[in-house]
Amino acid sequence: MKSNVNYLVAAVFVALIFFTIIYVTAILPATTFTPNKSDVAWEYSSSEKRGRDVYRREGCFYCHTQFVRYQDREMGEMVKAGDYVFETPHLLGTERTGPDLSNIGGKYPDAWHWAHHTNPRAVKPGSIMPSFSYLSNQDMTDLVAYLQTIGQKRVQPRWIVAPQEFRDKFHGVAEKTDVNASSFANAGRGIYMQNCAQCHGVTGKGNGSVSMTMQKKPANFTRPFYAGYDDATWYWRISEGVPGTRMPRWAKTLSDEDMAYLVAFLKTLPKPPSAKAGDISVTDYAALDQPEEMNQNFWEIEAQKHGSGESDPFTAYSEETKGAHE
Amino acid sequence: MNIIQNICSELLSDKPYSASRNFIISGVFWLLIGTSLGLLAAALMTWPDIIVNVPQMSFGRVRPAHINVVAIGWLSMGYLGAYFYILPVLVGRKGVWNERLANLTCLVFNLLVFTGVLSILNGYTEAREYAELNGIFDYIVLVGLFLSGLIGFKTVLTGPEKKWYVSIWYILGSLFWFPIVYVIGNRAFVAFEGLNDAIAGWFYGHNILGMWFTVGGIGILYYLLPRFTGNPLYSHTLSMIGFWTIGMFYAPTGTHHILQSPVPEWLKAIAVISSVFLLVPVLTVLTNFFMTMKGKWSLAAEHIPLRFVIVASIGYLLTCMQGPFQATRAINWYIHFTNWVVGHAHMALLATFTFIVFAAIYYIIPKVTGRKIYSKKMAVWHFWLSLYGVAIMMIILTCAGLVQAAGWHFAIPVDQWSVEMYPYMFIRFLSGVMIVLGQLIFIFNIYKTVFSKEAEPAPNSPTGIAFV
Ligand code: HEM
């Protein structure tokens, strides 16, 4: 009995400490931590608010985070505490199965989001994002309206660009090699046939003989999208490879000069955009064909089918934002 | 009329230990549902187009349903089933304080899980991880927890035995802490704005694990271990040190889940430091485990429940070495946002605490029904399928996490490498098939034990070795 009393005294004492700890770490911040709203914080309109509820209801935050960390390169600006004053309940997320969405607003046109939510694999082959084709038109409109507000269209590069260290490095290389000269492109063709064609194919379509063994198909360099790559980005991708895929880090085997020749050659492959896909606004899953090849994309197939001479909205859009960035 | 009366008297019976039995049976049922939902989620991550146009079967809804069913339907109900056997035995009484009320609590929980999972699948969700149950359901959880706490405390305080064995401390501790944690973490009761919502949300998200699953699971472990081995618990002092330090160090760690978000730095610092200090309670538990096992390892060859306890303890060792490690900023910097964390979560809840409840069930069911477990062979299959399943899942998710981490840190757009996740996700799916298969065998075995017409009576076996 006596030992029990001793324990009880201790228990009361410890319980006090315990409650203090809980108070300090869970409740107290709500009174002391009240950041001012930043220019990115956004008070949602009713449609956007409904869209945010769709986002919560469909569990998008189990796969998408909404905070950019300082080590996240190419995801746009880092977030600040003040960005979140209207984010109640929070949608920070803890797992990135898909990309961070803190800067998604303005990255794609609405039509792209409609197509992507309806059948993600039509526009992003190999994506494991679920299809949300069951959403009503109203839900879809609101959801897209919400997505377009996130990050307040902070300007950001459309696709990946080479990190600065590679830009500097390439600058040095380019002084010795003119990547726009056809003679260098021809030299690059030779190196390409020896090292790359078994995967990327002789015509650069990503259908080389080895590609059939791969889950992630080699890049298809004839896609109009690659027309947007600048020289340093080509150089960087060849030099460092694509982690997580079978694309090697060529800097380990090829010289800087060889890689510059390859840049000169690869630049000759992509076709500029040639056709318009039209506005897609569907919630019908079956209406969006999936490309057969992993390295193709719905918009490009549509463009080839309809071939009307205008550029497809997706690429045109990217040209626009790119202009704004430069 | 008679039938209804029969069912009522069965469901709300006041036979000693009937509540324990009913909780365990319901828990086992929800375990099968919960793991099947997990398997469905794993399938959706492998073949995203197998089910389209069915909102209830969309990944973003199946995943929270899976988590809530395994966390509340299976683990919590399994815990309460074990508690309602262990507490009365330890204080030397027959059955809990009010068996009828305990059975009513069991009904409340079943109703809660059933309606709760349907509501989540249909999109009625609070949309905060681990706290998905929304609005009215939060109140029902609280009622259930309040009733369980009341029964737990009353059972102990009105029991003849006044010298409390450590398990009682742990179990009562979990019953006391969890309702508090639940209230702070759910927007039905405490609703903060913006990032403060994330802070409170992860206070809850971490402490449902720390103050409920860990504290309760260790209470059950401390009860089972001396019984299974026939050795007295190595050190009561160590176990009490463990108890008080868990309380101190778990409470402030929540922020390590959002370590890299723009919340106040001092909170993050406290979270990281106390995460590392969690090694103190962990090491007390493990020292006690290994010292109590001394000289008894060979028992595991025949003693099936003991095997589960051994796996659970090793799972606890691994999880809790990994935990402080990945809570440090340098490691968290790399592995956050990836499947590594999902591997860790399964190591904790599946390999550790689920295995503890398995052991408890194999021991308690013969005790409360007076019947020997129907088939030893099935129990062995259940053991190996679950063990291999969770081991494969853990390894493959950890590898997948490292690949993902590399992808993020090389700034490669995720759609360029996410298909490379396919082999990992496929193997994870296979591991899920093994686990679900194991649980099917388990539920059949338990069903046969409890409900078949004629059954072998449970032999007199103090260590429980002859029960299975
Ligand atoms: C009783 C056993 C189980 C428990 C206690 C459990 C617990 C959990 C927990 C806590 C999470 C959340 C992880 C996080 O915070 O990111 C989770 C997620 C998940 N679990 Fe389980 N689980 C169990 C069994 C299973 C089984 C058998 C499968 C089937 C393969 C499975 C598949 C999944 C999937 C697919 C996710 C979502 C992961 C993601 O979002 O990437 N679980 N589970």
Image: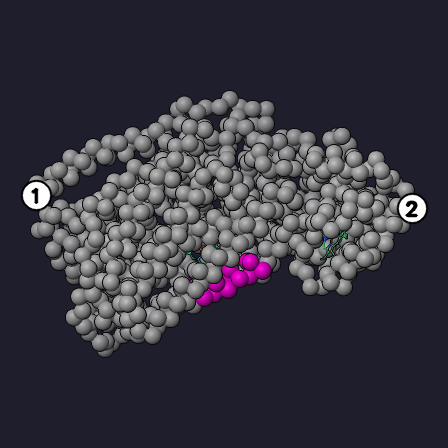
In the displayed structure, does residue A12 sit left or right of residue B197?
Answer: left
**Residue sitting nearer the eye, B224 or B325:** B325
In the displayed structure, does residue B468 sit left or right of residue B90?
Answer: right
Task: Choose mark 1 or mark 2, whichever is in front.
Answer: 2
What amino acid is labelled 1 in the image? Answer: Met
C-alpha distance separating marks 1 and 2: 96 Å
Q: Chain of mark 2?
A: A
Quadrant position of ligand 1: bottom left
Residue name at image x 53 percent, y 26 percent: A82
Which quarter of the figure is the N terminus of chain A placed in?
top left
Q: Is residue A28 magenta?
A: no
Q: Chain of mark 1?
A: A
Say whether marks 1 and 2 touch (CB < 8 Å). no
Q: Position of residue B93 (x, y in %)?
A: 12, 56
Helix, strand or loop at mark 2 = helix
Find residue A78 and name its label.
none
Query: Can the viewer see residue A28 in this picture?
Result: yes
How dense is the environment of label 2, judged by Cα within 10 Å: few (below 14), some, or many (20 and up)? Answer: some
In the displayed structure, does residue A39 sit left or right of residue B65?
Answer: right
What amino acid is labelled 2 in the image? Answer: Ser
Q: Which residue is mark 1?
A: A1
Q: Which residue is mark 2?
A: A183
Residue name at image x 11 percent, y 41 percent: A3
The quadrant in which residue A173 appears is top right
Q: Which span of residues is magenta-colored?
A: B423-435
Looking at the image, which residue sits at the far bottom?
B454
Residue name at image x 8 percent, y 51 percent: B160
Q: Position of residue B241 (x, y in %)?
A: 24, 42
Q: Is residue B429 magenta?
A: yes
Q: Position of residue A234 (x, y in %)?
A: 77, 43
